[in-house]
Image (cartoon, rainbow, N blue to C red):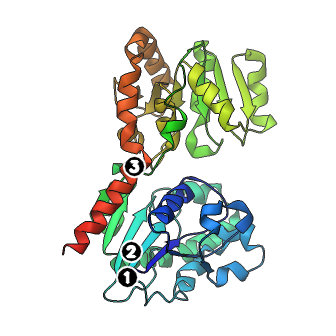
Amino acid sequence: MKVAIVHYWLVNMRGGEKVLEVLLEMFPQADIFTHVYDRATVSDVINSHPVYTSSINKLPFAKKLYQKYMPLMPKALMEFDLQDYDLIISSESGPAKGVVPNPDAYHICYCHSPMRYLWDMYHGYFRGANPLVRFFMSKLIPALRLWDVSSANLVDRFIANSSYVAKRIERYYNRKAAVVYPPVAIEKYLTLERKPEDFYLFFGQLTGYKRADIAIEACVRSGRKLVVAGAGAKSRDTGKYKKSKLVTFTGRVSDEEIRGLYSRAKALLFPGIEDFGIVPVEANAAGCPVIAFRKGGVLDTVKENGTGLFFDEQSTDSLIEAMDRFESCEEYFSDRKVFTEHVQRFSREAFVSGIRKIIEEQERV
């Protein structure tokens, strides 16, 4: 088979790019098509393949301002000539699935998320934008939504990275999606020795939707210690908590440092809503329980009363109540075997097996 992989943009190494790496290892002959490519920011695995870019890559400051060019990307996808390819895998959370395959090709879309700024998170993005951006959003978003829905007809099979994303695909595109969890490097954490100390952990970039504010307020109000690890905190956001001496902001941490935090934290606090969420899986692989808001990808990644607990309202009071419950039965979360068995479904091997199964099903048709 001649294989093309269409990835929205290649400007960093996050969860979507880790999925791309494994797809490239599965299909070493594959060519990559993308809107913007910054060779210096991606891995050797990606750089070892031919990479073809759209005209977006030539626009001013595209490697930094690529998201500003979003309205131009649907048309730019038409530049990719994929008529000679037998298998097309689009990796979608920005415009990627709207390529035109030949009639005999098989097009799989691995959907990390339907584009949030077009659908369920539109109002949040709109409120946070400046007046000029809001003006253009109001003019452009309706047409982009129409394109997004119509381009779903160019896909033969949707694959979602979680049940939560599968439901959103069905809602917006009226298409059923198989669920294949993305590969997580669980082996980096399985052998860590758990030595819980008297603090909770929040880990992730401090952007609004992750709701670090809920974790911080819950710990300050209830007199519990919290370590907040991840980039994004500003002095005006952190200053009011310095007097409490309960909250520690570490800023960006290394892989080794986060391994140490997972091994020592009482539990990971996860009050945001993620499409999948790699952090809870990593924490569970390290034997660290997760206390999460009951919505999003964590419904797949956390086993209730096995590897963590849920709280039902995205509020400080609800999280405090969940931490109270956790501390009343903390010993029930000490069986490392439960954690190890649970996270196997998120391994690289499970991902490869799931993707191969879907391709083989088509080959038998």
Amino acid under disc 3: Glu
For the N terminus, give its image quadrant: bottom left
The circle drawn on residue 86 is 1
Foreground mark, 2 or 1, reads 1
Question: In the drawing, does residue 307 fall left or right of residue 91?
Answer: left
Q: Mark 3 against mark 2, which lies toward the viewer?
A: 3
> What is the spatial separation of the Cα atoms under label 3 and label 2, in whole angstroms?
32 Å
Q: Answer with mark 2 or mark 1, whichever residue precedes in sequence.
A: 1
Specify whether residue 121 is in view.
yes
- The mark found on residue 149 in the picture is 2
Q: Position of residue 271 (x, y in %)?
A: 51, 34
Q: Which mark is residue 349?
A: 3
**Numbered circles on residues, count:** 3
The location of residue 279, given as percent across then percent down, is 53, 39
Q: Is the residue under label 1 in contact with that under label 2 (CB below 8 Å)?
A: no
Specify the label residue 341 is tagged with.
none
